[in-house]
Image (tube, coloured by chain):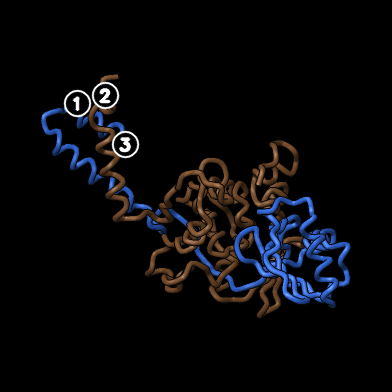
Amino acid sequence: LIQIKLFQQSILPWSHQRYVQTIAKHPPSLSFIPTNQPTNQPTTIPVYIYIQPDEYEKLGSYALIGLPDEEYQTRYVESDSMKTDYPIVIGGENFGCGSSREHAPVAMGAAGTKVAVCQTYARIFFRNCVSTGELYPVETDLRLCDVLKTGDEVEVDMVADVLTDLKSGKQYKLKPLGEAGPVIDEGGIFNFARKEGMIKTADV
Amino acid sequence: VTFSGPNFHAYIGERLKDYRQLKEISLTETSRGRCKLELIEKTRMQSSMAGQALKARPISRSSFRTSTSRGSRLIVQAKIDLQGGPRIIRGKCFVTRDVSLHSILTDRESEGVYFSLLLLNRHFPSSLSTHLSLLHISI
């Protein structure tokens, strides 16, 4: 109790201020976005974060920004762009680890990511993909990250659950999304809930 | 982006079921959940009829707005329904590898926390309990 009292009385406001300033100099792996006051603009992130459309577009420039330069010579989003040339992301295990916020899939969706095909996903990232409906987190038993390389043209058939390498013609089986699929189809958990009548339809 | 899923086309067909005389329909995605729907019609008369009918739709104005109507070409801003979603996604792929905490840059944030602690300790040098409480809470 004493510790908490000390913290509340004199330290918390000051430390909070310093903390934010320091972070601003060293942005974390994904993105720090300003959360504006609620407006009448259409929201792209549900619940408690209201974001302007131009801020949503800007988020795209932060997609996968945490990948180390020495290991990834090709940037997912070029420094002078907010859109990616790669709508399909191939990964290995634990994709999305370190990104516990909704901003991670939102940033990828804003950049133009449509689907990610990986062996496994970090649990929270997978859930956020479904909640926001920004991209399809598809799983596969195969290590496609060892087969494909960045820049390869591929096609993902969400009905047949097949990924096709358009150059070689090889097809790779994907796991079906199951009940998460319709939620993402609707653009996220809230749109899905509105459609199903779980919550009231928002007045636009 | 091309939405080629059968459900999406069915949705478009349902919305435009009275205007199958359209010569061409083109969709261009402008932002998430919205697209530019360009209806190229055969005659000027049909354009006017289609425009009136579109305005009469029971859809809110902000989500379905007729922006301009010139000659035989009607351009509307439509809020698209991704029912069914894009079923075939084609394009270049970006390949990443297995993700661990060592392969992504997540340690930058901890520098900020450490910096704050240093400053706080300097600001309150006489209070040992403050140091301990801060350290405890931060950890």
Q: Looking at this rendering, what residue extends furthest in the bottom direction?
A: A167
Residue sitting at x 62%, y 61%: A115
Q: What amino acid is at disc 1?
A: Ser
Q: What amino acid is at disc 2?
A: Gln
Report which residue position mark 3 lands on: B139
Q: Helix, strand, or loop for circle 1?
A: helix
Q: What amino acid is at disc 3?
A: Ile
Q: Looking at this rendering, what residue extends furthest in the top direction?
A: A1
In front here: A172 or A152? A152
Along the horizontal axis of the image, is B105 left or right of A151?
Answer: left
Q: Position of residue A56 (x, y in %)?
A: 51, 57
Chain that the image shows in brown: A
- Pointer 2 with pointer 1, Cβ within 8 A: yes
In front here: A157 or A19? A19
Chain that the image shows in blue: B
Q: Taking the image as drawn, is residue A95 in sight? A: no
Residue B5, by quadrant, is bottom right
Q: Position of residue A103 (x, y in %)?
A: 49, 51
